Amino acid sequence: MQGVQIFGVKNSQATRAAERYFKERRIPIQMVDLKQRAIAAGEIRRFVEKFGWDALLDREGKAYSDA
């Protein structure tokens, strides 16, 4: 079975929910804590190509409104 890679912050409620979702379904996960390791430019490019900017931006989040 192929696993999933989760990019998030360990103490984030959304990240914990994603981890729980996959663990409950016995899907292997690889967690990338963005406080420990920044996401690489190539990974960002790959996500934008696959999902588009609108799917990746949280326009209602505090970080977005602060920027």
Image (cartoon, rainbow, N blue to C red):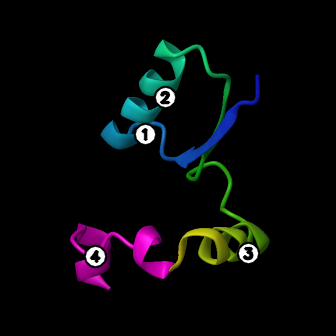
Q: Residue at x 49, y 28 (%)?
A: 19
Segment colored magenta: 53-67
Upstream in the sequence, badge 1 or badge 4?
1
- Helix, strand, or loop for circle 4? loop
The C terminus appears in which quarter of the rendering? bottom left
Three-letter amino acid code at the position of disc 1: Thr
In whole angstroms, how far apart are the C-alphas of marks 2 and 3?
A: 24 Å
Q: Residue at x 48, y 80 (%)?
A: 53
Upstream in the sequence, badge 2 or badge 4?
2
Three-letter amino acid code at the position of disc 2: Glu
- Helix, strand, or loop for circle 3? helix
22 in magenta: no
57 in magenta: yes
Label 4 environment density (alpha carbons within 10 Å; few <14, some 14–19, many ≥20): few
Which residue was labeled with disc 4?
A: 59
Three-letter amino acid code at the position of disc 4: Arg
Q: Which mark is residue 19?
A: 2
Q: Magenta stretch mostly in which secondary structure?
A: helix
How many discs appear? 4
Q: Are marks 1 and 2 in contact (CB under 8 Å)?
A: yes
Q: Are marks 2 and 3 in contact (CB under 8 Å)?
A: no
